[in-house]
Image: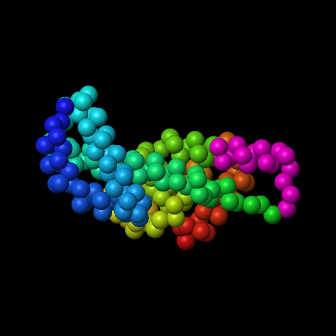
């Protein structure tokens, strides 16, 4: 277990940079402070079960804070926003079959996104659902802007190929066109 003095030292050493990092995600200082509090609580809980390697504490805090931020943004989005694919409205009337197929497509896209690596998922969520720029994404995730763009391109290609295999081609083309028009171009 980690003692109070060590936690205090770690806190003093990393709090400023972590606060800047978390504010890049949530934009509100009070929320960022709450998230960092949760990250330090998780550090203490982790230390009760496993020995801590002092060389990895900073990385642990960054990773934990990032995960809490993503959870927070997802919960906040669900309360106040709807994902991009929920906002797509097709002109004309759709048949019951088309409605069912469209809902299956939305579900399938959500499942496919969850199967990708954490960085790709984060890039997709931050770009499509949180409307962040590639520059903001790169800064928040600690990756290059070029990597963020490549991860997004890879995710869109993956979704396109996989959805096409499952027979949702026309609906996915429409969804992809809206995404590209709004966020990529």
**Residue 134 location in percent, x, y?**
43, 66
Q: Work out whether 181 lies above or below 56.
A: below
Name the residue furthest bottom: 185
Which residue is rendered at x = 29% and y = 34% of the image?
A: 45
Looking at the image, can residue 25 be seen? no
- The stretch of residues the image draws in magenta is 92-107
**Residue 144 location in percent, x, y?**
34, 62
Which residue is rendered at x = 86% and y = 50% of the image?
A: 95
**Of residues 33 and 109, which is closer to you in this image?**
33
Along the horizontal axis of the image, is 75 left or right of 57?
right
User: Magenta-highlighted stretch: main secondary structure?
Assistant: helix
Along the horizontal axis of the image, is 159 left or right of 89?
left
> Which picture quadrant has residue 176?
bottom right
- Residue 99 on the magenta segment: yes
- Looking at the picture, the colour scheme in use is rainbow
Which residue is rendered at x = 66% and y = 48% of the image?
A: 106
- Residue 72 on the magenta segment: no
Screen quadrant of the C terminus: bottom right
Looking at the image, can residue 103 be seen? yes
Screen quadrant of the N terminus: top left
> Which picture quadrant has residue 84?
bottom right
**Residue 118 location in percent, x, y?**
42, 46
Tally of marks: 0
**Of residues 3 and 59, which is closer to you in this image?**
3
């Amino acid at each position: 277990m980690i003692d109070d003095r060590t936690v205090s030292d770690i806190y003093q050493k990393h709090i400023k940079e972590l606060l800047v990092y978390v504010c890049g995600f949530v934009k509100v200082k009070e929320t960022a402070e709450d998230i960092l509090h949760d990250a330090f609580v998780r550090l203490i809980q982790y230390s009760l079960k496993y020995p801590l390697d002092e060389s990895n504490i900073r990385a642990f805090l960054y990773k934990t804070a990032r995960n809490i931020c993503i959870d927070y943004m997802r919960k906040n989005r669900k309360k106040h926003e709807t994902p991009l694919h929920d906002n797509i409205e097709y002109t004309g009337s759709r048949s019951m079959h088309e409605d069912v197929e469209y809902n299956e497509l939305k579900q399938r896209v959500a499942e496919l996104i969850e199967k990708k690596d954490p960085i790709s998922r984060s890039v997709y969520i931050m770009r499509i659902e949180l409307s962040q720029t590639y520059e903001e994404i790169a800064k928040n995730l600690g990756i290059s802007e070029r990597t963020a763009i490549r991860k997004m391109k890879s995710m869109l290609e993956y979704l396109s190929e996989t959805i096409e295999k499952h027979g949702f081609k026309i609906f996915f083309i429409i969804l992809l066109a809206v995404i590209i028009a709004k966020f990529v171009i």
